[in-house]
Image (cartoon, rainbow, N blue to C red):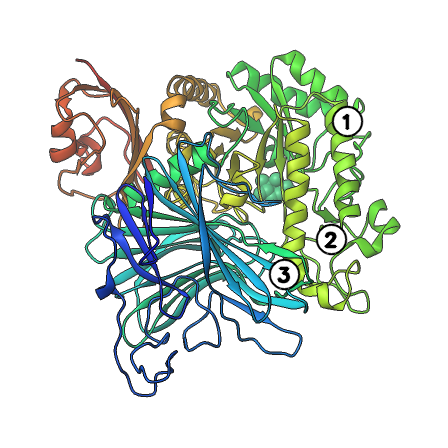
């Protein structure tokens, strides 16, 4: 890791170990992008990389020089109105309506470590040695604007973390109408774009397509990062796969509206921009005011998609997630949602908890329905008082009774919402987002509280603190069950309405910060109707996130496979639920549901009272297994082996950092008939280590398991004479232990 500056030539070379990122001060004072890719040696200058050429019609910066055109040069953080015809990284409107700006190089600073971003989640450095930050200072003297571009490189990790900071030091009021976290120009478009797309109940499916001329993008304009698109995209070379080839992954540390866009011009150059969605965004900057963008994380991998994901996992797992739970094995929980929905009372809950305790489960989570008059989803959000009819001893009494049974207690909340039928709404109808002279859309019969207003955040914060303080709570599931549709705040004047989406999410962060600071021992799990806000911004506050409301064993393989592109296994909320599955109505074996859930936080979400003795015994065994291998499963090195999006099967595995132990899972969706033998090639093992394999009466060396594969033919081929279970939706888990 090194940041080298050649002051004479204006070259900045950020060496992230495996990659080089090279910028240069251009003759017009703006910053140019010269190269991003596999590391190259440092040089005083790379004059030949500034690609100057005369092209008819191209706007040129200098009179008499027809070769210097921003339309064709690769730029670092491009402006609107100075000759570039592609999408700019930012746009500033002046009082006279002009949107032209021109930030030119002023200076730089290199700082050890990584600065915090005020009010925003951000990757952190634990000390000044493990990271280095370059601050590039630019100014636009005409408007009195200052712009700082921040770049952090980390020791031993091929990541580059970027953000932009705007300051108005001039005399007039400015409006920031676009402020992307990153812009990156690449010299060719021979890539496939990979992203994670889906919907509620089928979040983060892996999609990819070849880049084509024009603009291709993913986005959210829902006020949260969304089920539909995750704030992540990767560009991979055509020959790159899970294990080899060049991949560039970009992820945004933000939970609100975003845009991730790839623009391919007709010269086949690429411009990637990622940041807050400019739709409905305009941030007024009075003299002396500033704006910090969220940060974007770029990962460079030459080891394919697994290589990219492993870097994201290390960075996010150890330098984004914070607090005591960061490195701790996550408790095996039982959640009552699919067991009871809102139809419960204390007796039912205690009986479920007791059964869970007998199976070795460690944490009981009480889901929605414990407050106000909440017996269905039409009422009571905002009335954060126990429902005394259901819970005569309140949350305080129930939590202690659960503790007495030997379990920790966790609670569900949905602090950002209010039901129209609630005391809170009666008292404060103006606290919801929406225009009061129109009908406001409801989603799940509820409104969104206006978290751009500090009094609303403070009120909800006080209520939450009181409940937590009164009770014995060690886990919180923080839910959020509708998108923001009617964006209008009664708390802000006309020209500030276009700040509300962002202010709202800053309010959510503020409440998270308050509660996580006040209760540092509590494990927070974020949730948004399943995985509608599974993003890096949330991970900064909540070390784990509920991946999806779809708990079907097979659907989960797809969802978790996609989620693992960016997010560490320890962050992926995964439960075993009942069959037929409440979402897909499919019946899968208990072992298949567990095989998927092991690769996550692990827990149960079903009525234990309806299970047979045999099933309970199987669960007891699953819990034992998880406890034994939890450290490896949640904190080992994760490899995707076979994609569920490509065929009838899927596989993945975790390997301990010392490579002495590994757990692999193989999933076969439909029962094939009379097919060939199957070899599953493993990864990450010690080639010369000899491994004992569970369920096998022979041992194999690591190189055999990785190059030849693990033989699965005794059941995968559909052999009718086989003694092992056959049928659809099967999974097998293999443990490999090095014997010498
Ligand atoms: C949506 C969540 O994803 C579910 O797990 C559950 O908590 C419900 N909300 C409760 O309303």
- Secondary structure category for the residue under label 1: loop
Could you tell me if the residues under marks 2 and 3 are in contact, i.e. CB atoms within 8 Å? no
Q: Which residue is mark 3?
A: 169
Nearest to the eye among marks 3 and 1: give it. 3
Q: 511 or 726: nearer the eye?
A: 511
Mark 3 / mark 1, whichever is N-terminal: 3
Task: Return the mark for residue 681.
Answer: none
- Give the class, few, some or many, for how many residues have Cα within 10 Å of label 2's Cα (few <14, many ≥20): many
Q: CA distance from mark 3 to mark 1?
A: 57 Å
99 in relation to 253, above or below: below
Seen as rendered, the residue at the extreme bottom is 57
Label 2 residue SS: loop
Q: Earlier in the sequence, mark 2 or mark 3?
A: 3
Residue shown at the point (40%, 22%) measured from the top left: 631
Q: Residue at x 27, y 34 (%)?
A: 726
Q: Is residue 420 left or right of residue 224?
A: right
Q: As drawn, which residue projects farthest toward the front?
A: 8
């Amino acid at each position: 890791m090194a940041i080298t500056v050649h002051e004479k030539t204006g070259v900045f070379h950020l060496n992230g170990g495996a990659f080089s990122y090279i910028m240069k001060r251009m003759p017009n004072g703006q910053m140019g992008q010269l190269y991003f890719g596999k590391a190259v040696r440092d040089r005083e200058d790379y004059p030949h990389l500034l690609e100057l050429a005369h092209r008819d019609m191209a706007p040129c910066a200098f009179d008499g020089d027809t070769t210097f055109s921003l339309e064709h040069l690769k730029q670092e953080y491009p402006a609107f109105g100075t000759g570039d015809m592609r999408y700019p990284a930012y746009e500033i409107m002046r009082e006279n309506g002009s949107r032209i700006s021109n930030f030119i190089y002023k200076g730089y600073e290199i700082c050890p470590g990584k600065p915090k971003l005020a009010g925003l989640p951000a990757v952190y450095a634990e000390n000044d040695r493990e990271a280095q930050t370059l601050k590039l200072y630019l100014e636009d003297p005409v408007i009195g604007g200052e712009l700082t571009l921040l770049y952090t490189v980390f020791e031993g990790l091929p990541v580059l973390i970027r953000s932009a900071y705007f300051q108005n030091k001039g005399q007039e009021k400015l409006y920031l109408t676009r402020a992307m976290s990153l812009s990156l120009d690449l010299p060719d478009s021979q890539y496939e774009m990979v992203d994670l797309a889906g919907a509620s109940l089928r979040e983060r499916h892996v999609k990819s397509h070849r880049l084509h001329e024009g603009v291709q993008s993913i986005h959210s304009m829902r006020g949260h990062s969304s089920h539909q698109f995750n704030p992540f995209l990767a560009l991979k070379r055509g020959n790159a796969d899970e294990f080899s080839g060049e991949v560039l992954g970009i992820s945004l540390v933000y939970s609100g509206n975003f845009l991730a866009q790839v623009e391919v011009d007709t010269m086949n150059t690429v411009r990637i921009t990622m940041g807050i969605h400019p739709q409905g965004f305009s941030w007024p900057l009075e003299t002396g005011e500033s704006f910090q963008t969220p940060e974007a994380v770029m990962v460079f991998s030459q080891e394919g998609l697994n290589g990219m994901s492993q870097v994201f996992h290390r960075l996010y797992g150890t330098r984004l997630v914070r607090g005591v739970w960061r490195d701790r094995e996550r408790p095996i929980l039982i959640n009552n949602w699919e067991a009871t929905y809102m139809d419960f009372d204390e007796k039912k809950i205690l009986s479920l908890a007791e059964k869970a305790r007998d199976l070795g489960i460690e944490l009981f989570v009480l889901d929605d329905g414990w407050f106000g008059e909440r017996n269905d989803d039409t009422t009571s959000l905002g009335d954060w008082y126990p429902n005394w009819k259901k819970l005569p001893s309140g949350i305080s009494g129930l939590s202690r009774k659960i503790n007495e049974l030997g379990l920790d207690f966790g609670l569900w909340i949905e602090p950002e919402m209010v039901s129209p039928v609630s005391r809170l709404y009666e008292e404060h109808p103006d606290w919801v987002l929406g225009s009061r002279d129109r009908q406001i859309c409801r989603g799940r019969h509820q409104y969104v509280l206006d978290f751009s207003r500090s009094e609303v955040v403070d009120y909800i914060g006080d209520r939450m603190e009181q409940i937590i303080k009164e009770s014995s709570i060690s886990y919180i599931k923080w839910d959020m069950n509708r998108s923001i549709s009617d964006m209008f705040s009664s708390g802000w004047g006309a020209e500030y309405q276009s700040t509300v989406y962002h202010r709202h999410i800053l309010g959510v962060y503020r409440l998270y910060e308050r509660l996580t600071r006040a209760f540092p021992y509590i494990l927070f799990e974020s949730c948004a109707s399943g995985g509608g806000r599974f993003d890096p911004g949330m991970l900064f506050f909540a070390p784990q996130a509920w991946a999806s409301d779809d708990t079907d064993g097979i659907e989960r393989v797809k969802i978790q496979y996609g989620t693992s592109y960016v997010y560490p296994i320890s962050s992926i909320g995964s439960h075993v639920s009942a069959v037929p599955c409440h979402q897909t109505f499919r019946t899968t074996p208990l072992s298949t549901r567990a095989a998927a859930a092991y690769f996550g936080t692990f827990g149960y979400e079903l009525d234990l009272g309806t299970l047979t003795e045999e099933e309970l015994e199987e669960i007891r065994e699953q819990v034992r297994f998880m406890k034994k291998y939890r450290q490896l499963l949640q904190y080992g090195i994760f490899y995707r082996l076979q994609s569920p999006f490509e065929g009838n099967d899927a596989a993945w595995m975790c390997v301990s950092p010392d490579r002495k132990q590994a757990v692999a899972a193989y999933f076969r969706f439909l029962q094939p008939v009379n097919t060939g033998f199957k070899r599953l090639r493993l990864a990450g093992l010690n080639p010369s280590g000899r491994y004992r394999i569970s369920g096998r009466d022979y041992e194999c060396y690591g190189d055999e398991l990785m190059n030849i594969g693990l033989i699965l033919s005794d059941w995968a081929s559909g052999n009718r004479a086989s003694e092992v279970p056959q049928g659809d939706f099967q999974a097998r888990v293999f443990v490999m232990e090095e014997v010498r």
